[in-house]
Image (cartoon, grey):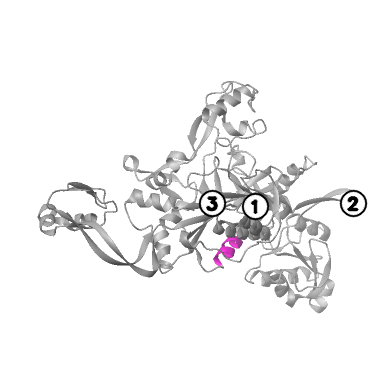
Amino acid sequence: MARDDSGRMERLSSIMRRRGIVAPAFETYGGVAGLVDYGPLGASIRRRVIDAWIEYWSSSGDILEIESPTITPEEVLVASGHVGEFNDLMTTCKSCESVFRADHLLEGSVDEIDGLSADQISSSLEKEGISCPGCGGDDWSECVPMNLMFKTSVGAMSRGRTAYLRPETAQGMFMQYPMLYRHFRQKLPFGGIQTGKGYRNEISPRQGMIRLREFTMAELEYFFDPEEAPIGKDGDWSTIIQMIPSSTGRMEQMSVSEALDKGLILHPTVAWFIARTLELVVSLGVDSSRLRFRQHGQDEMAHYASDCWDCELHGEHGWIECVGIANRTCHDLEQHAIHTGKSDFRAWRAFKESKTVKIDKWFPVQSSIGPAFKGLASAVSEAIGGLDEIPESLPFTVTLNDGTEISVEEGMAERRTEDRVVTGEWFTPHVVEPAFGIDRIIWHILDHAYEESEKEGDRYSVLRLPQRTAPFDAVVLPLFDKDGMGEMAKTIAGILSKARGLKIQYDNSKSIGRRYARADEAGIPWAITVDHQSLEDDSVTLRRRDDGKQVRCSKDDLQSMLLSHGSDMVF
């Protein structure tokens, strides 16, 4: 997978900057590490990737798009574990006072970094004689955890409420679970998708678009009954791909279907989303031969996951995680239920046949509750009747929805057993989450699409982007900007631009050869040329980027040809 041409990445980065795809942000002011700008072509590619992602998941019918704020109250992220556990270890060079993420310094020197404690990493830095990338010194401070979230305050000054810029879109979707449950008529499975910005205050951003402080995420939360784990037939189940199961730790060649049959993928719904992810990312322009799925070991697994697979893509930076597919079980919904004291984060499971069960519980004695608690009597009665754990005797304490603790004394409640016909039960749904790093995927789409060749002594570059993620579907070119060819080309470009689903560029600058080359370098799959014959019979030349072949066609047929992605054209 390694490339021999060390200058390839520099040339690709140069094209991305020069062509208005991606460049460092705020360069005029010296730039800010971990922030990038998408130029006109890059913003178009990014929008098309996001739209294709949304369209893919939404087309299944049981998944809908939602949107939540990028600012998240602290209480939400305390419940999710981010405030306490969303940390990386940092260390400081004592010579130049530069700060680095400690585990990154050990890459290439220590094989198994994941799972090492702060003390073990500090010891390894000294043992391996790791030098500072900045000054060459080797005297490091002790490793300490740094929370990666950007902290902020909502509200005025001292009365402000602590919040964070969201590190993931997931928690906003868990907050919307009750709304989704109602929308889908209280029937599982269903999912919510969300795209948007995420923020992580990386200790030492690097590798361009790979590790950003502000980045675009696309996440799906798929809620289901764990007793009826869903699995569909869509997705790519049969293609032989590279996989690294945690049980073997080595690269193996197999299909998703085979990995599930062998028990390497631990959950059928996880396998289903791996198959769907494979189908989606390849359709976006990822080279399937430079893709692998790697399973997390137990020491690497997130605190909320029972199984997790990363879709890793290979490019100029080596193997990079671009999608994480995790079985989050019921962790998030349970935590939010516990921290809020609300029952909004559950679902109802109907039994196939009703059951008669004995119910042992405490019942409020209204003649005592009313006079004792007055306006709170109804809330106290509800809390007594809703106890999940049955106290053995009076007195005992109940907690109201607002957090108030109430002592229930002798005579205020009585314990009894009764027969009850039960038709179902409440449970907490489980969740499988595919989380996509859009910026990382875009980088690899560009990397995989970039090709170079020698043409008449000059280096010729082309981006072989699929039409669905190319910045434009076609470029319209007048052979010469005279004799009416320019006017006709502009008219064609205007008509095609109004067609839903098509993006068209017009270019009349420089020679026709230079314009073809410019379009190829920008990844535009089709070029439409208006020439002298066009003025006579309304025909144009349609050129295909990937092989340079041309076909003559009527200008009136262009829209259908482009919308079919050229599938009905014969060259």
The answer to whether residue 136 is left or right of residue 230 is: right
Q: Secondary structure at mark 2?
A: loop
Instruction: From this view, report whether residue 137 is shown above or below residue 428.
Output: above
Q: Depth check: 489 or 239 in front?
A: 239
Q: Depth check: 444 or 512 in front?
A: 444
Where residue 136 sits: x, y (%)?
Answer: 65, 23
Q: Looking at the image, is mark 3 or mark 1 earlier in the sequence? A: 3
Residue at image point 54% right, 23% down:
141
Verify CB contact (< 8 Å) between mark 3 and mark 2: no
Q: Amino acid at mark 2?
A: Glu
The picture quadrant where one finds residue 280 is bottom right
Q: Depth check: 478 or 522 in front?
A: 522
Verify CB contact (< 8 Å) between mark 3 and mark 1: no
Boundaries of the magenta span: 51-58
Q: Secondary structure at mark 1?
A: helix
Q: CA distance from mark 3 to mark 1?
A: 22 Å
Which residue is identified by label 3? 326
**In the rendered image, is residue 19 in sight?**
no
Where residue 457 sits: x, y (%)?
Answer: 89, 48
Which residue is identified by label 1? 442
Verify CB contact (< 8 Å) between mark 2 and mark 1: no
Q: Amino acid at mark 1?
A: Ile
Where residue 287 sits: x, y (%)?
Answer: 72, 54
Instruction: From this view, report whether residue 8 is shown above or below residue 467.
Output: above
Badge 2 density bin: few <14, some 14–19, many ≥20, Cα 10 Å: few
In the picture, the disc for residue 267 is none
The answer to whether residue 193 is left or right of residue 158 is: right
Q: Amino acid at mark 3?
A: Ala
Which residue is identified by label 2? 456
